[in-house]
Image (cartoon, rainbow, N blue to C red):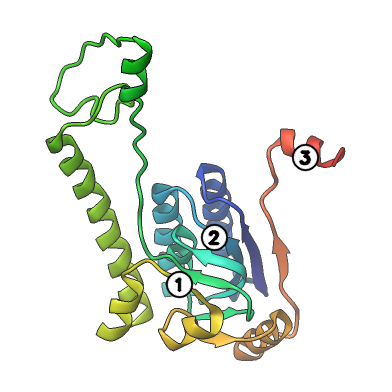
Amino acid sequence: MIYGIKVHGTINATMQDFLIQKINMCEESKRVKAILLDVNSSGGSASASEMIYNRVREFSVRKPVFTIVTGMATSGAYMIISPSKKIFSIKTAVIGSIGVYSIMPDISGLLEKIGVRIRQERMGKYKNASNPFEAPDEEAEKSQKQIVKGIYEMFLNMVTENRKLEKDQVNIIRESDIFLAERAVEIGLVDRVATFEESVSEIMKTLGEKRRPVFEIPKSPLFYRVLDRFV
């Protein structure tokens, strides 16, 4: 059988736990020939994306992983699917954003205007470098930039290695741009643009599987499931 998993929404710790649990189950099952990911996500947590990516890549050594992009596969979502044996996409899907960003609010100027002072005690030069109540010094900013750059280079190397990209293709994606599916095929991020049904049929044919995959999606937190009843 082909085990389908929907990767929809923000990549966070909840999705990480769900996906890794399902991948472990598929790896142990003799009935499962492959995993098919239905992806519509703009990414999320870098650490959660890496954890899922590592598990997808480990699984792909033993059994194939296929992906169909049905909306978006950008940032961390693309990291996750990059080890796939084949990546399909519908025409209107958006792919890419191979990059990293970090937000550090600075409201020190506002506090100064309204006459508020913040007292703090800290040990360690960079312990409170992300404190929004004071402007970061040059060394703290440099340290933060090095962290972001390190994650970015790791991400870029993952995609380059898994997709076997040429130098000119890497030069295009390294600017963290997003692309429609047909352009994504040209630069090596997607293998084929097709409808969902065409993609499923090709995957089934490749695996010699007659049964269609049944997709599973992680349950939303209780609050949102209750809210859905009234919307």
Query: Is residue 151 rendered to the left or right of residue 191?
Result: left
Res. 23 mark:
2
Nearer mark to the viewer, of 2 and 3: 3
- Placement of the N terminus among the 4 image quadrants: bottom right
Q: Secondary structure at mark 1?
A: helix
- Placement of the C terminus among the 4 image quadrants: top right
Query: Is residue 89 rendered to the left or right of residue 148?
Result: right
Q: Secondary structure at mark 3?
A: helix
Q: What residue occupies the far right of the structure in this picture?
A: 230
* N-term mark: 1 or 3: 1
* Residue at the image position 49 percent from the left and 84 percent from the top: 183
* Residue at the image position 14 percent from the left and 37 percent from the top: 138
* Residue at the image position 36 percent from the left and 26 percent from the top: 107
Residue 166 seen in the current view: no
Q: What residue occupies the far front of the structure in this picture?
A: 113
Identify residue type, mark 2.
Ile
Identify residue type, mark 3.
Arg
Contact check, label 2 and label 3, Cβ < 8 Å: no
* Residue at the image position 29 percent from the left and 31 percent from the top: 130
Identify residue type, mark 1.
Ser
Residue highlighted by disc 3: 225
Q: Give the image location of residue 71, x and y in percent.
A: 63, 68
- Name the one closer to the observer, 211 or 222: 222
- Name the one closer to the observer, 94 or 29: 94
Query: Is residue 72 rendered to the left or right of residue 82?
Result: right
* N-term mark: 2 or 1: 2
Res. 60 mark:
1
